[in-house]
Amino acid sequence: MLSIGEFSKICEVSTKTLRYYEEIGLLNPVEINPDSGYRYYSIGQLKTMLFINRLKSYHFSLEEIKEILNTEDDHTEEKLYSTLTRKRSEIQEKLHALEYTLKQIGNDLHQLEKGFPVMSYLDEIDVQLVETKPMTLLYTRKLMNRNDYTAGYGEYFSRLYEKVAKEKLTLLGTPMTIYHSSEYNPNGNDTEFAIPILEAVKRTRDMPGFLCARSIWKGPYSVLTSIYAKLREWIEKEGYEMVSSPYEVYVTDPNQTSGASEDMVTEVYFPIKKK
């Protein structure tokens, strides 16, 4: 048996943190002295505490760690393997994003050295006026917050592709996301994941053709807000107005590469009409 102080010292975790872990049910002492309230931990719990620290270093939340520790079935190791694999992908995604951020900072410094404003890159974004054709969309529609999007691309598009394969449907284009919310809500936005197909089956809808302002972006998704800003500015300047929800078409399938990759090609469409 180890006192909470001894346990704290060995694992380099404060007693305050240990009491919090007890409060949320993450790690409970094996014994509490009813008279003094002193808490004691077993030698075997050292391994559990080290495992918790390890998972925290992998950027798992305490709730995620609690779920991992509470997994008790014949597939525990398989689930842990899957969970760690997913976390590795998330960290790789963040690394790619940081690498791109460093490159952006370098470009901004280069622009400033040449005497150009940092935001002058917006002037280089090309906007085209195009006519789109009507499409039949196989779709799913969800409320998604910003943190859900990366997982959503994989999960919801995968489900749509599974339906395409199972029912032997005919693909007519690459995946797309339609944003229906009239304003940004950090708690959830009305988001439609869709794939153009030939057949009209269950969970499909018709999307009419539009006159659209379009920009094509090669780079990570994190910069798409700049494309949206440029398109909105162009629409106002040229005397148009929005008639339907904006949408993105992924020329590069988001399931096939990192969303932070500089090789991603995305088309952004704003359906419009003359004022």
Image (spheres, rainbow, N blue to C red):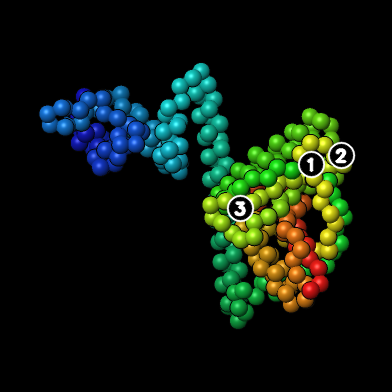
SS at mark 3 in the image: strand
Expressed as whole percent of the image width and height from the top left, the position of residue 229 reads 66, 68
The residue shown at (81%, 51%) is 207
Name the residue at the bottom extreme: 115
Relative horizontal placement of residue 43, taking residue 81 as reference (left or right): left
Label 3 or label 1, whichever comes before in sequence order: 3
Mark 2 and mark 1 residues within 8 Å of each other at the beta carbon = yes
The local crowd at label 2, few if under 14, some if 14 to 19, many if 20 or more residues have their Cα within 10 Å, is some
Q: Is residue 186 above or below residue 163?
A: below
**How many angstroms separate mark 2 from mark 1 (CA)?**
8 Å
Quadrant position of the C terminus in the picture: bottom right
| Residue 99 seen in this snapshot | no
Quadrant position of the N terminus in the picture: top left
Expressed as whole percent of the image width and height from the top left, the position of residue 80 reads 50, 29
Tag count: 3
**How many angstroms separate mark 2 from mark 3 (CA)?**
28 Å
| Amino acid at circle 2 | Glu
| Amino acid at circle 3 | Asn
Expressed as whole percent of the image width and height from the top left, the position of residue 209 reads 85, 57
In this rendered view, identify the residue nearer to me: 258 or 69.
69
Disc marking residue 189: 3
Residue under label 2, please give it. Answer: 199
In this rendered view, identify the residue nearer to me: 61 or 10.
61
Relative horizontal placement of residue 59, taking residue 166 as reference (left or right): left
The local crowd at label 3, few if under 14, some if 14 to 19, many if 20 or more residues have their Cα within 10 Å, is some
Residue under label 1, please give it. Answer: 204
Relative horizontal placement of residue 6, taking residue 213 as reference (left or right): left
The residue shown at (56%, 72%) is 109
Relative horizontal placement of residue 49, taking residue 206 as reference (left or right): left
**How many angstroms separate mark 3 from mark 1 (CA)?**
21 Å
